[in-house]
Image (tube, rainbow, N blue to C red):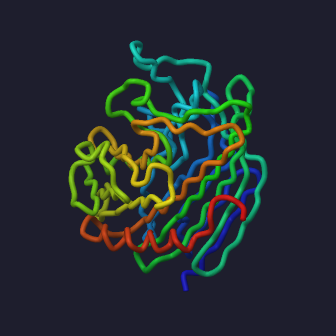
């Protein structure tokens, strides 16, 4: 048995521990400044062996925080953080950095090989308007001695009176910059790492914009002779499945199934849009990516949906 344990710091964060290893901490009430679009995030993120595979608030993009659900183009609002892409002006700092605000905890549950957390949020613009209510779930499950999987469920309901379009800098005119959605920022030592899909491995920047059901990223750790692997699987029921991917290995490591990469998604007033993902964290490398992806897909099929049933 893995002996998963949960540590809940009320009105702050939720951690899952595997023995003495903190697999991840989910901060649902961050102390983020408005400029960085306050939002819940997963950091630290670790393998079962304890290797750190996430980066928090890097100096080059301080709004990157481990794993987060971040959207740079929500109508004219920015729920990503920092400046907004304005075609013809590049990036401009506007007063439009919104907040994903925690409302209440809906569920905390744990057994030997799984742990689950669910809560409700509201999406509030910088000028105080509420655009979405959201129900979010996170569930961790052990796969084997070297791999575990985090499933994430997102259910966003448009509570405004208007239709809302969700897009990316690419949908606003910047070529090949379609980021937005579930975004992972890897540690510095993963820079120059390898991205991998069912079709094979390549430099991450070479795969950007391609459509795949899953994608992985393998990198090495400073200070030790070890490699770790992250694999993200997109649920078949997600809008725009299989998604285009925003992935980088040059300059820094990042992986993001980006459903709004090149086409905006319009969410009608009163409509709910749902997304589900499995994030596998493994003490392995590129050669194991296919097996890890299959295990993640299996855990995704077992996980509870993002919306209440």
- At a point 54% along the width and 47% down the height, the residue shown is 68
Q: Is residue 45 left or right of residue 222?
A: right
Q: Residue furthest bottom?
A: 1
Residue 230: quadrant of the picture? bottom left
Q: Residue at x 52, y 39 (%)?
A: 265
Please state which of residues 303 and 264 is positioned toward the viewer in this rendering: 264
> x%, y% of residue 130?
73, 33
**How many numbered circles are shown?**
0
The residue shown at (30%, 63%) is: 227
Answer yes or no: is residue 101 visible. Answer: no
Instruction: Name the quadrant containing residue 128.
Output: top right
Position in image of residue 20 (x %, y %): 55, 72
Check the picture and name the quadrant holding the N terminus. Answer: bottom right
In the rendered image of this protein, does residue 25 appear above or below residue 1? above
Q: Position of residue 271 (x, y in %)?
A: 67, 44
Most distant residue in the top direction: 89
Percent x, y for residue 189? 32, 50
Q: In this rendering, would 112 be left or right of 86?
A: right
Residue 290 can be seen, yes or no:
yes
Q: Nearer the viewer, residue 284 or 105?
A: 105
- Identity of the residue drawn at 33% across and 41% down: 252
Q: Quadrant of the C terminus?
A: bottom right
């Amino acid at each position: 048995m893995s002996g998963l344990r949960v540590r809940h710091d009320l009105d702050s964060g939720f951690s899952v521990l595997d023995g003495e290893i903190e697999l991840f901490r989910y901060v649902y009430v961050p102390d983020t400044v408005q400029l960085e679009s306050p939002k819940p995030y997963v950091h630290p993120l670790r393998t079962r062996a304890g290797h750190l595979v996430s980066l928090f608030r890097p100096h080059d993009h301080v709004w990157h925080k481990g794993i987060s659900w971040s959207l740079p183009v929500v109508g004219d609002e920015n729920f990503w953080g920092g400046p907004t892409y304005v075609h013809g002006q590049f990036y401009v700092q506007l007063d439009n950095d919104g907040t994903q605000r925690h409302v209440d905890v809906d569920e905390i549950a744990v057994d030997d090989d799984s742990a689950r957390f669910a809560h409700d949020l509201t999406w509030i613009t910088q000028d105080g308007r509420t655009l979405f209510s959201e129900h979010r779930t996170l569930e961790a499950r052990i796969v084997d001695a070297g791999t575990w999987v985090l499933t994430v469920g997102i259910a966003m309901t448009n509570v405004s009176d208007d239709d809302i379009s969700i897009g990316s800098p690419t949908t606003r005119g910047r070529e090949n910059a379609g980021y937005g959605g579930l975004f992972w920022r890897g540690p510095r030592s993963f820079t120059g790492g390898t991205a991998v899909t069912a079709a094979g491995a390549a430099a991450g920047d070479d795969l950007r914009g391609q459509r795949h059901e899953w994608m992985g990223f393998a990198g090495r750790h400073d200070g030790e002779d070890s490699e770790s692997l992250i694999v993200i699987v997109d649920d078949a029921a997600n809008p725009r499945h299989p998604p285009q991917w925003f992935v980088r290995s040059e300059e820094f490591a990042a992986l993001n199934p980006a459903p709004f990469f090149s086409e905006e998604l319009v969410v009608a007033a009163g409509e709910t849009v749902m997304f589900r993902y499995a994030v596998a964290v493994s003490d392995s490398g590129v050669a194991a990516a296919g097996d890890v992806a299959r295990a993640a897909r299996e855990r995704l099929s077992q996980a509870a949906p993002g919306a209440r049933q």
